[in-house]
Amino acid sequence: MAKSVLIVDDSLYMRTIIKDALKEEGYEIIGEAANGEEAIDMAFELKPDIITLDNILPDMIGTDILRVYKEEGLSSEVVMISAVGQEAVINEGLSLGARHYIVKPFTSEQLLDALANL
């Protein structure tokens, strides 16, 4: 059975790149969120197997969204994908439960490797 994925990124272009790469590998894209509020609502409504989460969104920071997921006991695996590559930010994301942190720009191979290792 294909793993279900929620893609969270404020950029339609980036969501499309992620969606196309994952669809080719057989992942089922069950939702797309463009901001933090949608990311939280959709995660609990859809309960995806995997969430790709941008760290910089118009209304929230990805690590704050991770805190909500953690506090509310969401069981989805989270892979952060962000242009923010500072070690402190990466470590914060990982400490809050993200399984991988991919820095933009990235290749489809990097993304697929991270998801394959969940």
Image (cartoon, rainbow, N blue to C red):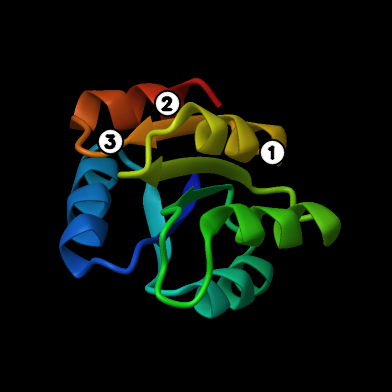
Q: Quadrant of residue 95?
A: top right
Look at discs 2 and 3 and give the one toward the viewer: 2
- Label drawn at residue 11: none
Query: Label 3's element?
Result: loop
Residue 28 placed where, x, y %?
39, 53
Q: Which residue is mark 3?
A: 25
Tell me which amino acid carries mark 1: Gly
Residue 82 placed where, x, y %?
36, 45
Q: Dot 1, how many residues are within 10 Å of its Cα: few (below 14), some (14-19), or many (20+)? A: some
Query: Label 2's element?
Result: helix
Tell me which amino acid carries mark 3: Glu
Q: CA distance from mark 1 to mark 3?
A: 24 Å
Sequence-wise, which precedes: disc 1 or disc 3? 3
- Label drawn at residue 114: 2
Which residue is located at x 53 percent, y 56 percent?
Answer: 62
Residue 67 placed where, x, y %?
73, 55
Which residue is located at x 57 percent, y 43 percent?
Answer: 78
Which residue is located at x 74 percent, y 48 percent?
Answer: 75
Q: Please name whichever residue, 87 or 104, is drawn nearer the observer in this view of the structure.
A: 87
Query: Label 1's element?
Result: loop
- Residue 1 seen from this side: no
